[in-house]
Amino acid sequence: MCRSSLYDNRSSFLRATVLGSTLCLFILMAHSFVNPSLAQSDSQVAPDFNVSSLDGEHFSNYKLEGEQALLMFWAPWCGVCQRELPKIARFYKHDLPDDLQVLTIGSSASLQQVEQYVDEHPRTFVFPTAYDANKSIAEDFNIRAFPTYILLDEDGTILLVRPGGGILNDQRFHQLTQ
């Protein structure tokens, strides 16, 4: 075998290795972003949770049963959350379907930071807002990014998981909530 054939084979092997490694890294990153079992599930029941809103109202997966529920996990330091929350407020006031509940859950910050953000934006927080004190709810839902939206059906089954902004532009969200 001549030297140029060896060089071509090594070069091809190196390119294939780099491409394969890049693809594997991308797949691993996508899987760690949101729990794939939640994201792909049309039949997984939401984890049990209990939380009180900042106004003292109690919420749990059982209390939300009977109507669809949109959970929004957010953090006060999150720029995307800061842009999304007013959009959710407008949706809540003007376009909310009768059988859809909204619960936002502040996480990844102190109670004081969440309360301060809510207090500084009273026109935004027109919906129930809770605080995930020990981040257990976010962990149970495997939240890895803020905001993350989770749409539950009337029985508490996860219909949609959407990390990042833009839930109100998501056609699947609108199809599932009509």
Image (tube, grey):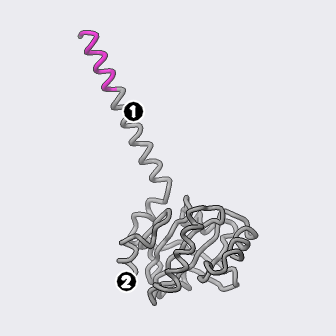
Mark 1 neighbour class, 10 Å CA radius: few under 14, some 14 to 19, many 20 or more: few
- State whether the magenta stretch is mostly helix, strand or loop: helix
* Quadrant housing residue 58: bottom right
Q: If you read the primary sequence from the N terminus, does the residue marked by circle 1 or circle 2 appear first? A: 1
Q: Which residues are magenta?
A: 2-13
Q: Name the residue furthest top.
A: 2
Magenta stretch holds residue 132: no
Residue drawn at x 44%, y 76% as measured from the top left: 157
Tag 1 residue: 18
Please, is residue 124 above or below residue 113 in the view? below
Mark 2 neighbour class, 10 Å CA radius: few under 14, some 14 to 19, many 20 or more: few
Give the residue type at disc 1: Val
Tag 2 residue: 178
Q: Please provide percent x and percent y for residue 108.
A: 66, 62
Please, is residue 172 above or below residue 163 in the view? below
Marks 1 and 2, Cα distance to the nearest angstrom? Answer: 45 Å
Residue drawn at x 24%, y 9% as measured from the top left: 2
